[in-house]
Image (tube, rainbow, N blue to C red):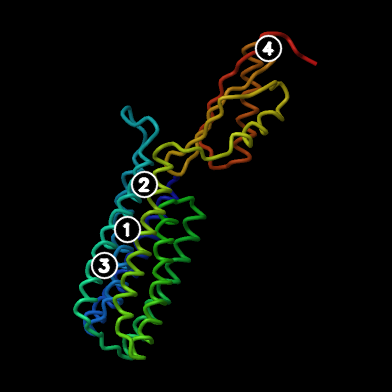
Amino acid sequence: MDDISYKETKRVLLVTLFLNVIVVVLKVSVGLLINSLSMIADGLHSLMDSISNIVGIFGLRISKRPADKSHPYGHEKFETLTTIVIAAFLLLVSFELLENSFVRFIENTAPEITFGAFIVLTFTLLVNVFVSDYEHRKGEKHGSRILIADSLHTRSDVFVTISVMVGFIVIKAGYPIADPILAIIIAIFIAYSGYKIIKRSTEVLCDASVIDDEEIGEIAGKIKGVTGYHKIRTRTVGEEIYVDLHIMTYGDSTVKEGHAVAKKVEKAIRKKYPHVKDVTIHVDPTHRVVRP
């Protein structure tokens, strides 16, 4: 991540942190006031947005450290690691909500739904829509996984808040059981969001393939002088993509000729995939001369 992307990502996280804190305070305060477990759950879900912003800022700062002897590929994977921390928080909150929901089933208490609660939910809904769209656009623009992951979490807030508003209508109609049921649904929703983040992040940490091997091979195969290719591997370190592959050249090629062919392959790959930071190519001359 370059300096401009780093500064912009940090600025986005600070802006969204400020907005998320406002949303949390409003939802939790009103939820406690009217004794609504579903609204408190919605507030806790939003609290995870605030925590993820803080963790994101911390992880971003570490990931920006330059490569050193102990970390020759840099520290950018720390950003991916922070998204797993975010997911862990989500799973913890989900468990707490499930526990409290079952308690509410036993107690069978009904929240006191007010018009003010609807106003607060409507306002926070609009804030969440703005934050989610804002983060996702900036994340796509600057190639920031942490912004995209956070925007997905915030987007889930939108659907959660809408479900709480619908639940309030059901409760007003005389079905208070809707409150703990909604809280359970929200808890499951939060847990699923955590699962998706963990799945995406572990793929990066475990060096899962990023680009299809055949796509890289097709690019290499079009370069004059390449007679074959194999051992194609791709992975990510932070936001950057690394490509390793072997290409085969004519058996009578000189080292200089082989190097020139490799440089053309590298240039073609970088042109197709701008986020590729490094291309390592091993040249294997064929055993016999097969020049046309």
Q: Quadrant of the C terminus?
A: top right
Local crowd size for mark 4, using a 10 Å CA cut-off: few (<14), some (14–19), many (≥20):
some
Residue depicted at x 35% and y 84%: 168
What label sits on residue 97 in the rendered view? 3
Residue 109 placed where, x, y %?
Answer: 22, 83
Single out the mark in the foreground, 1 or 4: 1
Amino acid type shown at disc 4: Ser
73 in relation to 15, above or below: above
The residue identified by callout 4 is: 253
Q: Nearer the viewer, mark 4 or mark 3?
A: 3
Would you name the residue on which mark 2 appears?
79
User: Disc 3 to disc 2, how far (Cα)?
Assistant: 28 Å
Q: Is residue 241 left or right of residue 32?
A: right
* Amino acid type assigned to the residue bearing label 3 in the image: Leu
Return the residue nearer the eye: 219 or 87: 87
Q: Tell me if residue 230 comes above or below residue 53 in the rendering.
A: above
Q: Earlier in the sequence, mark 4 or mark 3?
A: 3
2 or 4: tag closer to the N-terminus: 2
Mark 1 / mark 4, whichever is N-terminal = 1
Question: Which one is closest to the eye, mark 3 or mark 1?
Answer: 3
Q: Which residue is mark 1?
A: 52
Circles 1 and 4 in contact, beta carbons < 8 Å: no
